[in-house]
Amino acid sequence: MIDGEALAANCIAFGRLLRRAGLPVDPEQTRSFTRALGLVGVGRKADVRSAGRILFVRRREDRPVFDEAFELFWRRRAFGGELSGRLPRLAQSERRPGGLDLSADTGFGEERREPLTVVLPQAASSTETLRVADFGELSREEERDALRMLATLTPRLPLRPARRGRIRRHGRRLAMRQLLRRSLGTGGQPLDWRWIERRRRPRPIILICDISGSMERYSRFLLRFAHALARSGAPVEVFVFGTRLTRITRQLRVRSAEAALARVAHTVVDWSGGTRIGESLRELNRRWVRRTVRSGAVVLLVSDGWERGDPKALGEEMARLRRACHRLVWLDPLASRAGFEPLTAGLVAALPYVDRFLPCASVASREKLGEVLGGMG
């Protein structure tokens, strides 16, 4: 008979291993995997692997990573026999060149003596913990709390000097034209002095969001952020892309966030599909740059950098987009994870043309983004 607590502990360990390997695994998937193994059993290795593939693999390129992690995890003391609460030793000599990095610092070696902690679904996170938690690892209840926290954030907009000033009674720069005009009524004596105050207005913001399969867990939060920007009063243009580029600026011009997201859902047809960043940026540069992306705009591109197209073409389009805007910021939800390095082909091609590279997977990272935007005057 399978011990339920040991089974849950092993499933949690397997989920942690997949996250360290680079797969976006959340607690809900781990709980579903535990329930699935309680139904199908752990007697057959093929059944366990199939259940894991269904629940954890969302993209074709993730399947080899999952299979390698599963083979390393599957030992007699892991899912076989008495379902030990810890993993057996993973010898480094077993790791193939270019495979998963499962070094001793991952915490899954034989040196790990403390028992695994079974995380209860009912465990409530403190406000500070939820503030820094990754959106992709939140439960349903925590997602609702995080969305409420995002709704309270007021974006700090980048400002730029306006062309026309404001006439004031006090200031530092004398308004000579107004002063001379008013002096005509006093015999040429400048008695009524006026000053010019330089006004500042928000810079245009262009938000380009990746809604491909690898970004599925972050899409809802990204669109909530886009709606908050659209309601901030700044000139904002919003685009989403997976395999094609779609402009959703009009759909977000409603007061209710839920109504705005419903309108977006009816408009966009390539949710959770592949990623063609280069082709999407090419359409943006050819069709929309002259109409929406002005020289003073700040462009925010949100993506994890998984590119199915030609990375060289992506680099060329990034260079063209950078020349057309004031600042280009790349937001990556995976950038805040421990050990992250921008090594995907898309990021390697794009980063030379990026002014700032920032994480965007938590409430705290959105607050930091607001500070960075405020300093881009």
Image (tube, helix red, strand yellow):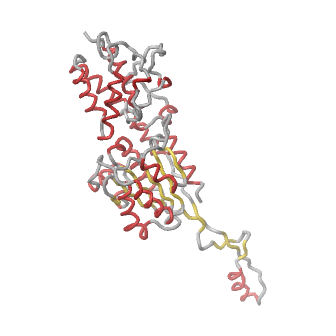
Residue shown at the point (33%, 17%) measured from the top left: 75
Query: What residue occupies the far right of the structure in this picture?
Result: 189
Q: Can I make out residue 19 in this image? A: no
Residue 86 % position (x, y): 40, 15
Seen from the viewer's position, the closer of residues 277 and 333 is 277
Give whichever of 298, 184 is nearer the camera. 298
Please tell me how many numbered marks the rendered image carries.
Answer: 0
Picture coordinates of residue 284, whole percent (x, y): 39, 63
Q: Residue at x 39, y 17 (%)?
A: 87
User: Which image quadrant for residue 368?
Assistant: top right
Q: Is residue 366 visible?
A: yes
Observer-nearest of 281 and 66:
66
Q: Is residue 5 left or right of residue 332?
A: left
Locate the C terminus and report the quarter of the image it occupies.
bottom right
Give the residue at x 46% y 43%. Answer: 343
Q: Position of residue 101 (x, y in %)?
A: 44, 30
- Nearer to me, 5 or 147: 5
Residue lying at 38% horizontally and 62% vertically, measured from the top left: 282
Relative to 2, 350 lies left or right: right
Locate the N terminus and report the quarter of the image it occupies.
top left
Please determine whether, in this image, residue 197 is positioned above or below residue 115.
below
> Quarter-wise, where is residue 326 in the image?
bottom right
**Does residue 164 lie above or below 149 as drawn?**
below
